[in-house]
Amino acid sequence: MAATIEYKCPCCGGNVEYNASMGQMQCPFCDTIFDVAALMEKDEALNNVQPDQMEWQTPEQGFDPNSMDGMNVFTCKSCGGELMTDANTAATQCPFCGNPIVLSGRLSGALKPDYVIPFKVTKQQAKDQLKQFMSKKKLLPKSFASDSHLDEIKGVYVPFWLFEADADAHINYMATRTRTWSDRDFRYTETQHYRLIREGSVGFANVPVDGSKLMPDDMMESIEPFNFSEARPFQTAYLSGYLADKYDVDKETSKGRANERIKQTTQSVFAGTTGGYATVTPESTTVNLRNTNVHYALYPVWLLTTTYEGKKYQFAMNGQTGKFVGNMPMDKKAYWKWQLLYTAMFGAGAWVLLFLLGKLLGS
């Protein structure tokens, strides 16, 4: 059976037909005219679109069984969170659920991180910034700040997989330019259609992907960026006085999120080169990765988990830059009070405006 080929109109989606009298392709639905060669070139280009090649060829990380001497990994019996601490820590609280735990036992053979970014924001600075942040929230219940256990702020080294690669990309776009004019009888609009091709490479270094299941990915990405230029080769001394969450999302699982972030950024960079058109619509994107590598690092995060009226609230602060995010409760009484105030102010303003308008028209 013979195969069928259809050419779709990029304007309305209808099937484009060949107009013998004009010697060109024409859409019978919107009357848009196309050059035959251009449509065939577009069809050939789309048929030749290649799938993404975003495979990570990374060397196996070696491990020295003596490199984790002085470090312990414990499991919180309340929430299952895994905590990595230095040998001097005897008792603490789980930064995820607040459960008090006594540290005992030892786990050998854990994977040693490649890098660590030391804390720069002190515990007191983190507490002061949190209080300042709360003071600006007019709809925050007054008792929330006083009832919050600010002394339970914990400094945690969060595990991150760092991906680096060169991304070679090929992106096809459909673009339009529009011209409008009119005469005594009609108003005319002319739309020109273009096929844009963009090719190039974008280099990526240290794209972070959260390696902990207990850390919300959106929260960890919200406190980015971290300044990797301040990273240091991993030493257990940096963990003194802090907790460290051992990764429970391996690098193989994390590659999907890394690919997504790399592809989104590449598309954004390429889109910045398509100015000068009324509309630009991407049709196909192919990204190939080369020179890939993955590192394992610990990044500093201040965490606070507190309970208010039976509900848990979690906050996170970048322990290097001080960037802060978190969800907070809302005082419903204060909300309706402000809502009524705004409504009254709007109503009064509208009344004054109508009064002045009436005086103006009356005069």
Image (spheres, grey):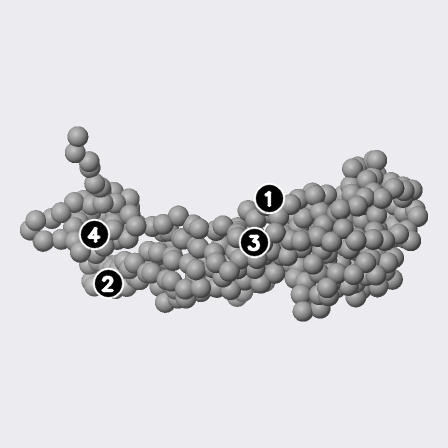
Question: Could you say where residue 9 lies in the image, as x and y percent from the top left?
Answer: 25, 47
Q: Amino acid at mark 1?
A: Thr
Mark 4 secondary-structure assignment = helix
Question: Could you say where residue 140 lies in the image, as x and y percent from the top left?
Answer: 79, 50
Q: CA distance from mark 2 to mark 3?
A: 62 Å
- Of residue 124 and residue 239, the one placed in the foreground of this image is 239
- For discs 4 and 2, the disc positioned in front in the rendered view: 4
Q: CA distance from mark 3 to mark 1?
A: 14 Å
Disc marking residue 182: 2
Mark 2 secondary-structure assignment = strand
Residue position for label 4? 40
Q: Amino acid at mark 3?
A: Thr
Ranked by sequence position, the earlier of labels 2 and 3 is 3
Ranked by sequence position, the earlier of labels 1 and 4 is 4
Disc marking residue 164: none
Residue position for label 1? 253
Mark 1 secondary-structure assignment = helix
Residue at position x 17%, y 30% from top? 1
- Of residue 117 and residue 340, the one placed in the foreground of this image is 117
Circle 2: is it few (<14), some (14-19), or many (20+) Cα within 10 Å?
few
- The answer to whether one can see residue 296 in this image is yes
Mark 3 secondary-structure assignment = loop
- For discs 3 and 4, the disc positioned in front in the rendered view: 3
Q: CA distance from mark 1 to mark 2?
A: 59 Å
